[in-house]
Amino acid sequence: MFEQTSWVLFLKYLDDLEKNKLTSSQLGGTTYTNIIASEFQWKTWAAPKLEDGKIDHDALTGDDLSDFVNNELFPYFKKFKADASSANTIEYKIGEIFSELKNRIQSGYNLREVVNHIDELHFQTHAQIHEMSHLYEGKIKNMGNAGRNGGEYYTPRPLIKTIIKVVSPNIGETIYDGASGSCGFLVEAFEYLKNSKELSTTDSQTLQKNTFYAKEKKSLAYIIGLMNMILHGIEAPNIIHTNTLAENISDIQEKDRYDVVLANPPFGGKERVEVQQNFPIKTGETASLFLQHFIKILRAGGKAGVVIKNTFLSNTDNASIALRRELLTSCNLHTVLDLPGGTFTGAGVKTVVLFFDKGVSTKKVWFYSLNLDRNLGKTNPLNEKDLSEFVELQKTKADSENSWTLDLKDIDQSTYDLSAKNPNTPEEAPLREPHEILEAMQKLDKESAKVMKSINSLIKIT
């Protein structure tokens, strides 16, 4: 249902955005020209109001509403793309969205009900927009948990926030996700940077136009990512609808590189031979190709946080060994976060997060194994408190029961195996031999008899 109604929610948000801009311009003594023509504004077709504030009973409904939406409204917004002054405008992005979307609510009467409900939402104050963002994220999360199209591109927000804290991007750095999905990494990075300090006008412009970059292959994910970024405050997101892996990484030049990479590439995908030809290390594993792309597209001195299956650390095939060698020699893999099963609801795979900096080879790797006293799942999801010890210990790379440091000199130089084996886990007592158990039982029997004899003596005395 979310895929079907998201465009209605988006148009209501645009209507409130235009109202906010009109109010701001009036307060500043300037003139604001609406993006949307009057006949296609929310108040005209969706929610014409009576004097008492209720929706006019003569508002479009049934077949009239469906015909208007399908034959006039969507074509109107689709035309925004061709008419926009540049791709770096909200008009162009609106056109992109409606070029990809279709109205899938077939009944005009059902559509009228949806419109009436969404009209009750307001996105004009900071608190209202924040509430709406949570609503939107919740719907994306439910899509992911349903294991459908969305399941590939929802990453738990507590994990994303933790990765961003560790990577610690700065305003002025460019941030990239080549498998962006619903743009959760970029949305949270925007929130992190927005709250990192008092923003100047230049800072705000930098965040709006020159900070966040993404690519996404799937149409639905691309559209949801676009809308998610716009609804969170980035009016003209730099998101490209393309297959990242179709690009030959040997063509990446310095001008194409980014300061920060934040990503969770798809698990378990398999790529065709012609796609593999774009990479020096040939493999059908989608995530391994993405990792090669991320290493290549990261600027020297750049930093990354990338989620990948934990089998990456120990797979013995030639491609995995070559990829580990490439990562360790071209980057400083300074931190590995080992996550428990169930971190990704509905996905049984175990994952790790690789934190690395480009340009200096790895000497030591600090590992942290997240051990929780509960099983993760839909009713017990990962939260930020679960990850708080990791964030604190990572600052100094301290050893603990859950963390340790691996010296690269100590690993097998032929396989570069990085298996996450914690040497600091308290050892369990070894199992005793049968004769030891019998001896202990006899000893206990004697002690028990002695205690009972003393008790009986006391009873006789009293």
Image (cartoon, rainbow, N blue to C red):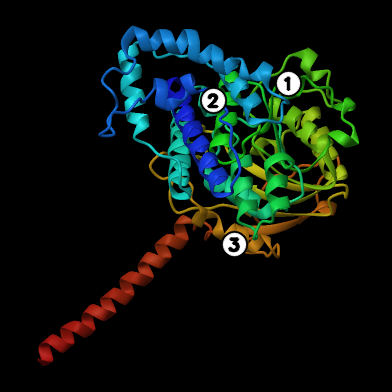
On the question of residue 293 being in view, the answer is yes
Vertical relation: 456 (above or below) 319 = below
Out of 387 and 106, give the one closest to the viewer. Answer: 106
Secondary structure of the residue carrying numbered label 1: loop
Q: Is residue 34 left or right of residue 397?
A: left
Disc 2 versus disc 3: nearer the observer = 2
Q: Which residue is mark 2?
A: 36
Residue type at mark 2 is Ile
Q: Residue at x 43, y 26 (%)?
A: 42
Q: The disc labelled 3 sits on which kind of residue?
A: Glu
Which is nearer the N-term, disc 2 or disc 1? 2
Residues packed near mark 3 inside 10 Å, few (<14), some (14 to 19) or many (20 plus): few
For the C terminus, the image quarter is bottom left
The mark found on residue 195 in the picture is: none
Q: Amino acid at mark 1?
A: Gly
Q: Outermost residue toward the bottom?
A: 461
User: How many circles with numbers are drawn on the protein?
Assistant: 3
For mark 3, what is the residue? 401
Side of 120 where 149 appears, left or right: right
Is there a contact, CB below 8 Å, between mark 2 and mark 3?
no
Q: Nearer the viewer, mark 2 or mark 1?
A: 2
Tell me which residue sits at (53%, 37%) in the image: 231
Residue 116, image x and y in percent? Answer: 32, 26
Q: Where residue 59 sits in the image (x, y, percent)?
A: 32, 18
The Cα–Cα distance between marks 2 and 1, rounded to whole angstroms, is: 46 Å
Which secondary structure, mark 2?
A: loop
Name the residue tied to disc 1. Answer: 284
- How far is disc 2 from disc 3 in space, using C-alphas? 59 Å
What residue is at 16 percent from the left and 88 percent from the top? Answer: 458
Observer-nearest of 247 and 130: 130
Q: What residue is at 67 percent from the left and 18 percent from the top?
A: 83
Q: Could you say whether the residue bearing mark 3 is in a helix, strand or loop? A: loop
